[in-house]
Image (spheres, grey):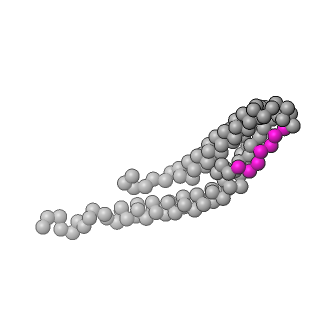
């Protein structure tokens, strides 16, 4: 039998790397939980019509409120509907960008051996 005593090729060095990877993954998991709590508390504003309509969402895209200026009502229902839609998209895009940036910060430097 050749290669006696070589085991599966998973020496102590690899075990240490794997342990470090698990430690980093646990830190990321804890950070993700904190980040989720922060995102829930954030208020991110999207707007349209130069601020006539504002939509506020949380950092994880949960709608919080809509603010409509009295002048927006004079624009008519169809234009007001368009303004709300644009403001919603603006808030959503800002929220997803914020979430993506925060997740990248959280996972930067995470290197798993063998991946």
Task: Name the foreground residue: 12 vs 7.
Answer: 7
Residue 96 sits above or below residue 27 on the image: above
Residue 11 x %, y %: 31, 64
Q: Position of residue 86 (x, y in %)?
A: 70, 35
* Residue at figure coordinates x 60%, y 60% from the top left: 33
Residue drawn at x 63%, y 57% is 36
Where residue 75 sits, quadrant-wise, is top right
How far across and how far down the image is residue 5, in percent?
Answer: 21, 69
Is 93 or 72 nearer to us in this picture? 72
The magenta-colored residue range is 63-69
Residue 5 magenta-drawn?
Answer: no
Identified at 81% across, 40% down, the residue is: 68
Residue depicted at 40% across the width and 60% down the height:
17
Above or below, 41 relative to 50: below
Would you say residue 40 is visible in this rendering? yes
Q: Quadrant of the N terminus?
A: bottom left
């Amino acid at each position: 039998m050749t290669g006696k005593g070589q085991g599966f090729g998973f020496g102590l060095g690899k075990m240490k790397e794997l342990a470090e990877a698990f430690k980093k993954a646990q830190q990321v998991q804890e950070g993700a939980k904190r980040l989720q709590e922060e995102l829930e508390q954030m208020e991110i504003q999207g707007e349209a019509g130069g601020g006539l309509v504002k939509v506020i969402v949380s950092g994880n895209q949960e709608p919080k409120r809509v603010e409509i200026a009295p002048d927006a009502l004079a624009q008519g229902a169809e234009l007001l509907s368009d303004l709300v839609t644009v403001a919603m998209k603006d808030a959503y895009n800002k929220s997803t960008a914020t979430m993506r940036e925060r997740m990248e910060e959280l996972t930067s430097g995470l290197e798993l051996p063998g991946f």
